[in-house]
Amino acid sequence: MTTSASQTMMIQGCLDRLRAGDESARQELIRCACGRLERLTRKMLGGWPRIHRWEETCDVMQNSLLRLCHSLSEAKPAAVVDFFRLAALHIRRELHDLAKHYYGPHGMGTNHATAAWKSPCDDGSAGATAREPLGADEDPASLAAWAEFHHQVERLPEEQRDVFDLLWYQELSQAEAADVLNVSQRTVKRRWASARLRLHKVLGETLPPPS
């Protein structure tokens, strides 16, 4: 049995206990899933480079886990894939809130200035500052594209969304995803291809590349 498969069984055991009313299983569940949750957070944060400038993976993960733990007092996922889908939802919400915090009208990022970059029309006068230039992958249109990308992933048919979550966000192999979903690897390949095609049709060239 692979390490991933063994971990999946442990997570499922915690979920079964939680659904049976054992609230102590909640913290054990988070501990068992910690490695995957960190990879999931790092993957999703990589799609928000301007937030990554201000926040580290561990900070985003910690705040997302607080959201997740709170929701687990009411939501009781039945399967491992449902648990990670719930975790991804709370990470997305945390990232969206951070984007509003840093890049809203009065956000630090919106009004950030740096001396490392000079405007072409800077006359060098004392006290002159220049707003930091945006990278090609960091402008508002790019951030909007990522937000729409995550939104469209949520709208995928359940079977396709499960596979996409496991392969794209959690970075499992197709064989590992097949074990988690209890389907054949051929089925995983077919659903993966269908999910990517569906997203491409909806998003077209706005589909962000995997980070």
Image (cartoon, rainbow, N blue to C red):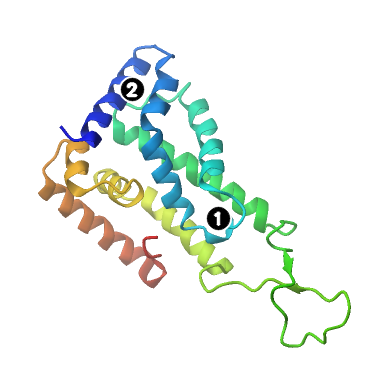
Q: Position of residue 100 (x, y in %)?
A: 64, 53
In the image, residue 107 above or below residue 206: above
Determine whether, in the image, residue 92 is placed left or right of residue 140: left
Give the CA separation, mark 2 to mark 1: 31 Å
In the rendered image, the residue lying farthest to the right is 126
Q: Say which quadrant the C terminus sits in.
A: bottom left
The residue carrying pointer 2 sits among few (fewer than 14), some (14 to 19) or many (20 or more) residues within 10 Å by Cα, namely many
Residue at the location (37% across, 52% down)? 153
Q: Classify residue 199 by image quadrant.
A: bottom left
The answer to which of marks 2 and 1 sits earlier in the sequence is 2
Q: Position of residue 95 (x, y in %)?
A: 54, 49
The amino acid at mark 2 is: Leu
Determine whether, in the image, residue 92 is placed left or right of residue 155: right
Q: Classify residue 158 by image quadrant.
A: top left
**Which mark is drawn over residue 184?**
none
In the image, residue 211 above or below residue 71: below
Q: Which residue is mark 1?
A: 52
Residue at the location (21% across, 33% down)? 5
Which element carries disc 1, helix, strand or loop?
Answer: helix
Q: Which residue is mark 2?
A: 15
The residue carrying pointer 1 sits among few (fewer than 14), some (14 to 19) or many (20 or more) residues within 10 Å by Cα, namely some
In the image, residue 11 above or below residue 120: above
Q: Classify residue 87 by image quadrant.
A: top left
The amino acid at mark 1 is: His
Q: Pick whichever, 31 or 158, lies toward us.
A: 31
In the rendered image, the residue lying farthest to the top is 21
